[in-house]
Image: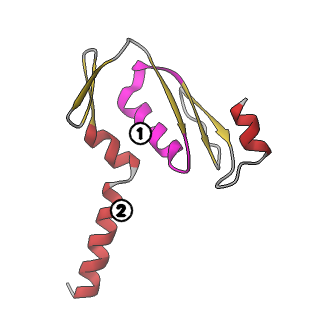
Amino acid sequence: MNYKDFILSLFLSSIKSVHPKNLIPSILNIEKDFLKIENQTFNIPEKIYIFGSGKASIEMAKALEKKLRERIKEGIVVCNYVENLEKISVMQGSHPVPDEKSLKAGE
């Protein structure tokens, strides 16, 4: 492998490692009534709510739905595009300047 290919491979693997579908399962764990995020542990209720906003919120919500499954009661994320999720509602907003869609999502 030449230098250019090595650097490109390193860059792509770095980006892949922080994608929510890879990052969230690697740092988040549920054990009985405890949510572990890296070295922190939280006592959680039987059902939890998910809230998020921003460009990566849908990908994070998808990863959380996959990881937490039946523990999620419901949730809402606001992103610049809409996608159907199982338990989490998605509202469309704009980025970086709020517009009418953003205001509606905030209601």
Which SS does the magenta portion mostly show?
Answer: helix
Residue at 69% over, 33% down: 106
Percent x, y for residue 44?
34, 17
Residue behind mark 2: 15
Residue 106, relative to residue 18: is it above or below? Answer: above
Q: Going from the N terminus, do you reach mark 1 or mark 2 first? A: 2
Label 2: few (<14), some (14–19) or many (≥20) C-alpha neighbours in 10 Å:
few
User: Mark 1, mark 2: which one is toward the viewer?
Assistant: 2
Q: In the shown orientation, is residue 59 left or right of residue 3?
A: right
- Residue 93, magenta (yes or no): no
**Quadrant where the image shows the N terminus:** bottom left
Q: Residue at x 69, y 54 (%)?
A: 97
Q: Quadrant of residue 29?
A: top left
* Image: magenta residue range: 53-74
- Per the image, the residue denoted by label 1 is 63
Amino acid on which the number 1 mark rests in the picture: Ala
What amino acid type should be assigned to the residue bearing mark 2? Ile
Which mark, by number, is residue 107?
A: none
Q: Quadrant of the C terminus?
A: top right
Secondary element type, mark 1: helix
Q: Secondary structure at mark 2?
A: helix
Residue 66 in magenta stretch: yes
| Mark pair 1, 2: CA separation | 16 Å
Q: Measuring 35% from the left and 32% from the top, which residue is drawn there?
A: 67
Q: Looking at the rendering, which quadrant does residue 11 occupy?
A: bottom left
Residue 32: x and y, percent? 25, 15
In front of the other: 85 or 27: 27
Q: Residues within 10 Å of mark 1 (few under 14, many from 20)?
A: some
